[in-house]
Amino acid sequence: MSSTRTLIRGGLVVTAADEIHADVLIEDGRIAALAAHASAVAEGWTADRIIDATNKYVIPGGVDVHTHMELPFGGTSASDTFETGTRAAAWGGTTTIVDFAVQSVGHALREGLDAWYAKADGNCAIDYGFHMILSDVNGSSLKEMDHLVAEGITSFKLFMAYPGVFYSDDGQILRAMQRSATNGGLIMMHAENGIAIDVLVEQALAQGRTDPRYHGEVRQVLLEAEATHRAIQLARVAGAPLYVVHVSADEAVAELAAARDKGLNVFGETCPQYLFLSTDNLAEPNFEGAKYVCSTPLRPREHQAALWRGLRTNDLQVVSTDHCPFCFSGQKELGRGDFSKIPNGLPGVENRMDLLHQAVLDGHITRRRWIEIACATPARMFGLYPKKGTIAPGADADVVIYDPHAEQTLSVETHHMNVDYSAYEGKRITGQVETVLSRGEVVIDQREFTGRAGHGQYTPRGTCQYLN
């Protein structure tokens, strides 16, 4: 391939560490150099393509480390394929996803991983990596963990929820954590007491409480907090780091904060749905609440303040989407008359960067913190930095030209996710992705998709870069 040079001129470069008025030179898919506007260095640069970023932000491509493309769940599958889901991610300014390969009970990790390699290969518009879901912790799967870490699958998700599907008991969790303590892997935990939740589900349905709102009521805050506490103590026993996914409740944040105050390698992620939506959405009439069924569930609005505070104080480090879309028609509707049969998951991979920019304008976080929680920290947490997550010489040229003044209204009519509703229908946002480069290739050009399936490359990962 011949050498190509792209020059991004006139923008404000925003990273987790800096905000600088600089021009960015891209060569052969990587950031070659940055130089101050109108400096002798920048004026001397020539390029095949010049992008004018005047009055715009130049930011790293988003890194979404929690997606579920094509995930089988509850007798159906997530409605976004790797092709449609990664295209939507690009539209939203995300240039790397880390999706979850699934081990089925009774099968090897390798079998599940190979199935996910096959689903994604040749179909992704942006770069991608994988975590591994452990559904069956036993002697052979524990040994396999070592092999996966060696080939760049450096994180493993366990579930304290979903008995009979993904659930692991405390003994299995401890064994997996002990293994990760020696092989450098990071355990990701879905922290909800699934055994207790199943009792409450059964009781609610027996009392005729079948509407979507009861999904949130049975999955109680205390059962998230208890599981978070238990996961932390098991990690302490194992001497292993822990990353708690989709934290939704104030009391769970408090458990993470307490652990971090002790200097433990415990990390937390939340998602836009917990920051912007609430049980008010789950209670929407005519079964509309089913659109908002996900686990952990949406919480009463007052929990949002604790989540924003956690993001500001770094008790929560990452905002991912847990993108797992199911259409309302034909998929969410499987749970009419029984909330426990509603497929769990929300669409959001396209909305994350914009919603977090709105949070900057609303005063919840700073501009640099926006980039930190959406780009830099997820890349560091999962061994992708500085290849991903920043704009610096040598980094992949995953770059977004972001218009902080453009106004848009989020809607199913305009989004690119393969799902028949928007979780944020009608929400007005200031800020919009204008142009996106993935490894130097323009995949969104002035709000037009110019990318292609197959451009995205599988990206093996190093280990977590925060472990002391």
Image: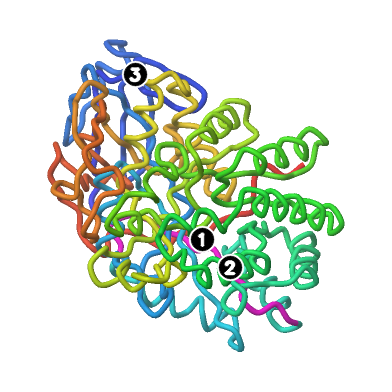
**Number of the label disc, if any, that sits on residue 345:** none
Q: Amino acid at mark 1?
A: Pro
Q: Which mark is residue 22?
A: 3
Residue lying at the far front of the rendered structure: 207
Identified by mark 2, the residue type is Glu
Q: Which residue does the image show at 67% across and 54% down from the upper left?
A: 223
Distance from label 3 to label 2 (Cα)?
37 Å
Q: Amino acid at mark 3?
A: Ala
Q: Quadrant of the N terminus?
A: bottom left
The magenta segment is 124-138
- Confirm or deny contact between disc 1 and disc 2 (CB under 8 A): yes
Above-or-below relation of 263 to 21: below
Picture residue at 55% right of the left edge, 45% below the top:
248
Q: Residue at label 1?
A: 460
The residue to which callout 2 is attached is 151
Check residue 387 for magenta coloring.
no
Circle 3/circle 1 CB separation < 8 Å: no
Query: Is the residue marked by circle 3 packed among few (<14), some (14-19), or many (20+) residues within 10 Å?
Result: many
Q: Quadrant of the C terminus?
A: top right
Q: Secondary structure at mark 1?
A: loop
Q: Secondary structure at mark 2?
A: loop
Measure how far apart labels 1 and 2 are at the Cα level: 7 Å
- Going from the N terminus, do you reach mark 3 or mark 2 first? 3
